[in-house]
């Protein structure tokens, strides 16, 4: 396999066997994508099951909210910690540890006897997810050193997010209506076991840097800042942006962010060296990820509410209605991975963002209460454009960091994307709750999302490298 141990040393244990032929290129990708798919699926699959869970476990409204939000808060808050641990202890080791934690916590969720127990298990699931995701990109970068193969792997990795997020309501509706809500979590067990087997057998040990101490004050500041920001954004969709708790959460999140920046300047072993954070390529790529997640997941959230609350679709019908956006993600990721060798990343990111903007603008132009057939093409354009641009933006961020900081770079990119998703959902919920009317709020949400895509296209022009990477 095309792996090499660095001078920093590899994880202890026997080396992974070196499969030949197609397995050499496919097996690591299958292993990593299985773990990533499982993580993102759990963000959305629970939504259709929560009403049934609440009735079955006699959960309060607050308990129901924590079943859904607790996972997201811990996941987003500990991503940077997961990345730092991966760089220090070895990305494969931390990735596998995260899969074990996530799988065991999923089993605990499935057999939860009460709502508080389920909330606690969901928090542990979020911790496992935060260990999985940063290592996933770093492992792909190690497994596919050739630029063309790496771009294709990044593209398929990115498509997993769109497929899992949009397929969650469909799969959740099927499971809840047939075998019961506990299978929403039990489905993770075979996926987790398969992921562990594939990773242990086909993914080589990762370099370690045990001399790099973790800067715990900085990590605590990141956890506090991201968790507070995500919580405030979640509450803004329900309480409104002027609510005291929301404003306090935003203020505390800003204070935690300032403390993190100050600590990073003083730390001997920063989570990400300041020169990397000041890099236009890395910071710009992370901002692009925030913006297109803002637009795409804002669309998925508001579209789901529109289909169920205004059009009377069931959860299963909503999943089918969103399928056009999902279907385009895999095709777009494969195509962008093939084209990047010829064009470089910048044209793909810019064209993808422009297409995404065109899709949301088309939805807004369709009127306050458009017929569903008029929305199919806009959803396809948005799904295609987002996935088309994800490959290049991922490669941009990962390529800007030295291998020793691959986990931290992956964590930064995924943290900003999670924040973008939370912002899109929060703003969409606030606009739908305004007194201007449901249709007007939905239309405004799509226009703002289109502007976010246009902003991302402008950033890509300045920040994404223009030169095509050699084959």
Image (spheres, grey):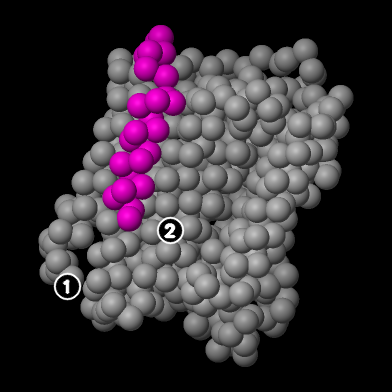
**For mark 1, what is the residue?**
369
**For mark 2, what is the residue?**
424
Residue at the image position 62 percent from the left and 87 percent from the top: 60
How far from the left and from the top, in percent, is residue 418?
Answer: 53, 51
Q: Quick check: 220 left or right of 26?
A: right
Q: Is residue 397 located in the magenta-colored stretch of the structure?
A: no
Give the residues drawn in magenta, as a range.
Answer: 448-471
Q: Quick check: 382 left or right of 38?
A: left
Marks 1/2 in contact by CB < 8 Å: the verdict is: no
Instruction: State the quadrant of the N terminus.
Output: top right
Which residue is farthest top? 470
How far from the left and from the top, in percent, is residue 462?
Answer: 40, 25
- Residue 51 vs 417, above or below: the answer is below
* 308, 201: nearer the viewer: 308
- Residue 31 vs 56, above or below: the answer is above
Find numbered disc 2 in the image and state the secondary structure of the residue it sits on. Answer: helix
């Amino acid at each position: 396999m095309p792996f090499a141990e660095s001078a920093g040393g590899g994880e202890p244990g026997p080396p992974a066997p070196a499969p030949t032929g197609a397995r050499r290129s496919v097996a690591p990708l299958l292993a990593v994508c299985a773990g990533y798919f499982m993580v993102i699926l759990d963000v959305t699959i629970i939504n259709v099951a929560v009403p049934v869970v609440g009735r079955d476990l006699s959960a309060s409204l607050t308990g129901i909210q924590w079943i859904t939000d607790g996972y997201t808060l811990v996941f987003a808050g500990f991503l940077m910690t997961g990345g730092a641990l991966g760089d220090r202890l070895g990305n494969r080791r931390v990735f596998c540890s995260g899969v074990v934690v996530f799988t065991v916590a999923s089993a605990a969720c499935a057999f939860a006897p009460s709502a508080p127990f389920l909330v606690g298990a969901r928090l542990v699931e979020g911790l496992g997810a935060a260990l999985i995701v940063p290592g996933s990109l770093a492992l792909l970068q190690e497994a596919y050193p050739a630029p063309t193969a790496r771009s294709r792997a990044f593209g398929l990795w990115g498509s997993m997010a769109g497929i899992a997020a949009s397929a969650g309501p469909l799969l959740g509706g099927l499971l809840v209506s047939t075998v019961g809500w506990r299978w929403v979590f039990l489905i993770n067990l075979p996926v987790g076991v398969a992921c562990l087997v594939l990773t242990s057998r086909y993914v080589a040990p990762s370099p370690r840097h045990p001399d790099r101490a973790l800067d715990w004050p900085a990590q605590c500041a990141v956890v506090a800042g991201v968790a507070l920001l995500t919580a405030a954004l979640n509450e803004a969709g329900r309480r409104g942006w002027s609510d005291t708790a929301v404003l306090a959460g935003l203020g505390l999140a800003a204070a935690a962010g300032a403390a993190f920046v100050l600590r990073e300047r003083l730390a001997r072993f920063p989570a990400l060296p300041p020169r990397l954070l000041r890099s236009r390529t890395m910071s710009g790529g992370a901002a692009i990820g925030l913006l297109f997640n803002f637009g795409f997941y804002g669309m998925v959230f508001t579209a789901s509410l529109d289909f169920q609350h205004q059009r009377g679709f069931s959860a299963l019908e909503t999943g089918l209605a969103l399928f056009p956006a999902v279907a385009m993600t895999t095709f777009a990721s494969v195509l962008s991975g093939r084209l990047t060798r010829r064009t470089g990343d910048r044209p793909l990111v810019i064209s993808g963002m422009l297409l995404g903007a065109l899709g949301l603008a088309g939805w807004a132009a369709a009127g306050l209460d458009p017929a569903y057939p008029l929305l199919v093409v806009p959803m396809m354009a948005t799904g295609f454009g987002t996935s088309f641009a994800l490959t290049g933006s991922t490669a941009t961020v990962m390529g800007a960091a030295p291998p020793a900081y691959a986990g931290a770079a992956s964590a930064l990119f995924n943290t900003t994307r999670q924040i973008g998703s939370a912002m899109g959902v929060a703003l969409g919920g606030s606009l739908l709750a305004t007194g201007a009317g449901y249709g007007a709020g939905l239309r405004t949400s799509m226009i703002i999302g289109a502007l976010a895509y246009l902003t991302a296209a402008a950033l890509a022009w300045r920040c994404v490298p223009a030169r095509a990477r050699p084959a």
